[in-house]
Amino acid sequence: MKIRTRPNVFMKARIVKGLSQRDLAKQSGLSPSYISLLERSVKSVGPATAKRLCELLEQPLDSLFIIE
């Protein structure tokens, strides 16, 4: 099972919250470069990371991520 971001939705949710990639990285405990990879859907995420990002961005899992 892979969990990939919906790039445009993920980036828009971050911007609407007023967060830079660096801000989101700091709050989530991830690196800014990893956030960048997620926004381009280059990397997949684990369930716990996906849940944490959804909580920070206040979005449901199925709107930000695609489960393959």
Image (cartoon, rainbow, N blue to C red):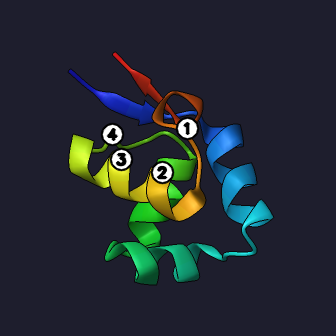
Amino acid type of the residue tagged 2 in the rendering: Cys
Q: Are marks 1 and 3 in contact (CB under 8 Å)?
A: yes
19 over 62 or under it: above or below: below
Examine the rendering and report whether any part of residue 46 can be seen. no
The tag on residue 54 is 2
Identify the secondary structure beneath mark 2: helix
Which residue in the structure is indicated by mark 3? 50
**Which quadrant of the figure contains the N terminus?**
top left
Residue type, label 1: Leu
Tell me, yes or no, whether the two marked residues, 1 and 4, touch with CB atoms within 8 Å.
no
Question: Within 10 Å of the Cα at label 4, are there few (<14), some (14-19), or many (20+) other Cα atoms?
Answer: some
Q: Which of marks 4 and 1 precedes in the sequence? A: 4
Q: Residue 10's spot in the image, x, y percent?
A: 62, 47
CA distance separating discs 1 and 4: 12 Å
Q: Position of residue 17 (x, y in %)?
A: 72, 67
In front of the other: label 2 or label 4? 2
Cα separation between marks 3 and 4: 9 Å
Instruction: Give the mark nearer the N terminus: 2 vs 4.
Output: 4
Spatial CA span between label 1 and label 2: 7 Å
Residue 18, quarter of the rendered image: bottom right
Residue at (44, 80) in percent of width and height: 27
